Amino acid sequence: MSRRYITTAIDYPNAPPHMGHAMEKVLADVCARWFRLSGHDVRFQTGTDEHGIKIQRKAEEEGMTPQALVDRNVPLFQSLYSRLHISYDVFVRTTDREKHWPTVQALWKKLQEAGALEKRTYVGLYCAGCERFLTKRDLADGTCPIHHTAPEEVSEENWFFRMKEKADYLKTLLVAKDGYVITPDSRAHETLSLLEQGLEDVSFSRPQSSLSWGIPVPGDENQVMYVWCDALTNYISGLGYFTDHEDKSYWEDAEVTHVIGKDIARFHALIWPAMLHYAGIKTPNRLLIHGFLTSEGEKMSKSLGNVVVPDDVIAKYGVDPLRFYLSHEIPVGNDGDFSWKRFGELYDAKLRNQLGNLLNRVLVMLQKLGGDLSDIQNSAGLKSIVASGWSMYAAHMDAFQITDALATDVMSCVSAGNQSFNDKAPWTEKDDEKRRVILAEYVELLRHIALMLLPFMPETAQKISRQLNVPYAERMLEKDFTIDTVHEWGSLKDWKKVGIPEILFAPVE
Ligand SMILES: [Zn+2]
């Protein structure tokens, strides 16, 4: 059993979560659930990045302390993720002085000992919206390309991270692709071309007078850490690095995957491995980089009034159809679109008419014959659909091509099942025993489909399995449930009878 450690980006809780947050967490959760299902020892971490000038200013606006602001907003993220069935093991809050700060301050000291940090006077262009210094190259017509405001010229003392020193190391790391992979490839190329343009040293702290809401620099209390050392370090503070509850096994002995958005790709691809290298800690194994989500074809923004709130979708369709939509429609690495119309089409066509209908037809007919399952046949048809379905599905899931696994591999098993059911027309078979034997095969097909759906729609997978009365149905969502003994055709000898059919997906107006 090998170890896997998978993390999401930590969210900035200056406002409630939106669909983009949901998309990333569902993606990471699908991966984590697949890792567990295929027998790995998994640790899955998410959290919130709670410091910085934007939180500080937002709190001032609302007349509250930054701590009160994050204490109010962070539970909005946690409760959404629990409604979405995000199966994380650890939730890191960067304001956690007991669990997060000690690792960050210890890492800072290690970087200092390794000669990575140097105090300099910095004169630069600072965008308050971005919360970072911009270079001339970043600007468009003298303004921040994201915020369209002119940056302020700021002169101050900063601790600098000596990034330039690590250019060769990073180049080798990226080119070798030996245990360190950026997915998709296009992002790896982008990172390499950033390297080729040359790196600059990075401001790692700010004077307390301009940034008070953050972690103090150890040994220099007039300075407060800037986002890098604070936020990126969550990936190891959650493992208790450099503290008395240290557990390096999910880093040192594990395959480490960071799931992040394209907007923070370059920081993860360049600054984080450079920090780790200075500190003598191994690099993560993979950056899995997702795109952005638009709404009805347009950029999601408050001013356009088209921000999709995950709870609105959950209220109308339920959690699993939302997880299905996000996984089915948005290939990892690409930008995706949220469209209510497309959502409704997919819900009706795939979930109700294909999946729900097949399950219901088979169960209703078999129940009329008493529901007995003894002697599931091994005829070539459905068995081979399932065998090739599993092998393509596993290959896609292992390669993080989860959209192919769901939209192509699982849904082909579903549509092939429907097709075969219509062709065989078991309702025309006059002999009850022969009809029962035909139907039992579709029940076995549906059992496999439910297992394949588990990472995507855990609750639905369990509902199907309960209706089928599969013996493992009650424990299939436990973290130690694996497919190794149950994914062979006809392997469940203790499965005798199907359960009561129920409508899986109700019609939605
Ligand atoms: Zn900006």
Image: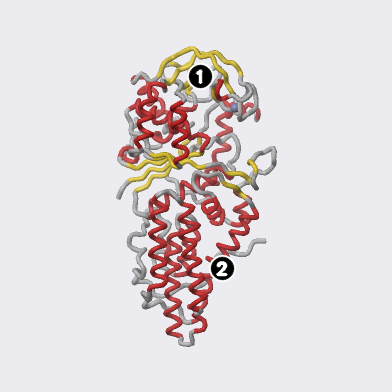
Kindly identify the residue that appears in the image at 34 percent across and 72 percent down. 493
Report, in whole angstroms, how far the alpha carbon at label 2 lies from the one at label 1: 58 Å
Quadrant containing the C terminus is: bottom right
**Relative to 243, 143 lies left or right:** right
Toward which corner of the image does residue 304 lie, by quadrant?
A: top right
Q: Is residue 174 left or right of residue 157?
A: left
Q: Secondary structure at mark 2?
A: loop
Among the 4 quarters of the image, the one containing residue 491: bottom left
Residue 483 percent location from the top left of the image: 36, 59
Q: Residue at x 50, y 57 (%)?
A: 407
The quadrant of the rendered image in which ligand 1 is seen is top right
The picture places residue 127, in percent across and down from the top left corner, at 59, 23
Mark 1 close to ligand 1, CB under 8 Å: no
Q: What residue appears at the point 40 percent right and 41 percent down from the top-left corner?
A: 257
Provide the residue designation for mark 2. 503
> Residue at horizontal 44%, vertical 42%?
183
Residue nearer the viewer, 401 or 507: 401
Q: Position of residue 503 (x, y in %)?
A: 56, 68
Total marks drawn?
Answer: 2
Residue 282 is at least partly visible in this image? yes
**Which residue carries the number 1 mark?**
206
Disc 1 on helix, strand or loop?
Answer: strand
Question: Residue 311, how many percent across, how many down?
Answer: 61, 49
Q: Is residue 360 left or right of residue 482?
A: right
Under mark 2, the amino acid is Ile
Residue kind at label 1, given as amino acid type: Arg
